[in-house]
Amino acid sequence: MSGHSKWATIKRAKGATDAKRGKLFSVLSKDITLAARDGGGDPGFNPRLRTVIAKAKAANMPADNVDRAIKKGTGELPGVVYEEIVYEGYAPGGVGLIVEVTTDNKNRSASEVRSTMGKNGGNLAGVGAVAFQFDRKGQFIIDAKQIEEEALMDLALEAGAEDIKNEGDHFEVICPMGEYDNLTQALSDKEVESESADLVYLPNILVPVDDKDTARKVLHLIELLDNLDDVKAVHSNLDLAEDLLGEDE
């Protein structure tokens, strides 16, 4: 498994622990509202909503916050109108970045993303300039204590998964976008909880970085972007050389 992939899955698997509480709740609230808007407010009939609610519970998000976000999505409560926007760009070393944003003010979001990249050795690119280096997939991170590998393989492949990776303490399950809801439902039926479940951008072209200074700049830029209020997720095609940063990572 590439250095990038290992780094990405570890960061994702521990994201709920390391994320700032306020930012995490904000992202979850927006996701719940969008899921309820697009698929209805009943999690029993809305797999995407059910998955996000499970994330919210795992993060100890108050039930009142969850209910309020659902009602904003269904129109029972007034709320802002969110847009989902994807920005493409480059980090130092030519590393490609996909920045997912959920915002009620796209001009503000564009300005913040552009400024953050420009001040830290990156730059925004036009639509399609970077996206071809990534595939849109469903990704599930599952604690290895949840289920045996063979049982997970049988379950996931039957539900449409295309790849299951054993990363020691957790499994990474990948599926096509069109099978995401099926796999969500199949895992739920077997009471297998995911530490993370989402539609993500996975790189199909990796950019190797074997210079410590460049690697630190790339990771720093990703962290700064990820900390912006409107940013939901940042995906890169960074291929980090094995043990390049050591304890610095």
Image (cartoon, grey):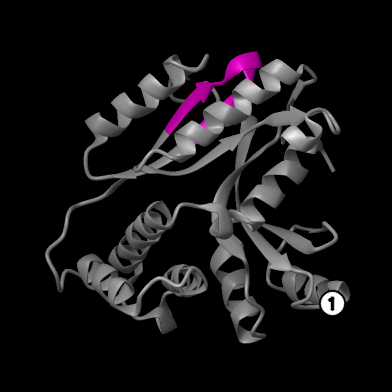
- In terms of secondary structure, where does tag 1 sit? loop
| Residue beneath disc 1 | 148
Q: Nearer the viewer, residue 167 or 163?
A: 167
Image location (x, y in percent) of residue 108: 25, 31
The stretch in magenta equals 87-99
Magenta span includes 220: no
Quadrant including the C terminus: top right
Above/below status of 101 relative to 14: above
Residue 97 shows in this picture: no
What residue is drawn where x is 45% and y is 21%? 117
**89 lies left or right of 32:** right
Q: Residue at x 75, y 20 (%)?
A: 212
Give the image location of residue 150, x and y in percent. Answer: 87, 74
Q: Quadrant of the N terminus?
A: top right
Q: As displayed, is residue 76 above or below residue 22?
A: below
66 w.r.t. 118: above or below: below
> Where residue 214 sits in the image (x, y, percent)?
68, 17
How many other residues sit within 10 Å of disc 1, few (<14), some (14-19) or many (≥20)? few
Quadrant in the picture for residue 185: bottom right
Is 214 on the left or on the right of 199, as rendered?
Answer: right
Residue 95 highlighted magenta (yes or no) = yes
Q: Residue at x 49, y 68 (%)?
A: 59
Query: What residue lies at 70% left-to-right and 34% top-to-bottom?
Result: 204
Q: Is residue 127 visible?
A: yes
Q: Amino acid at mark 1?
A: Glu
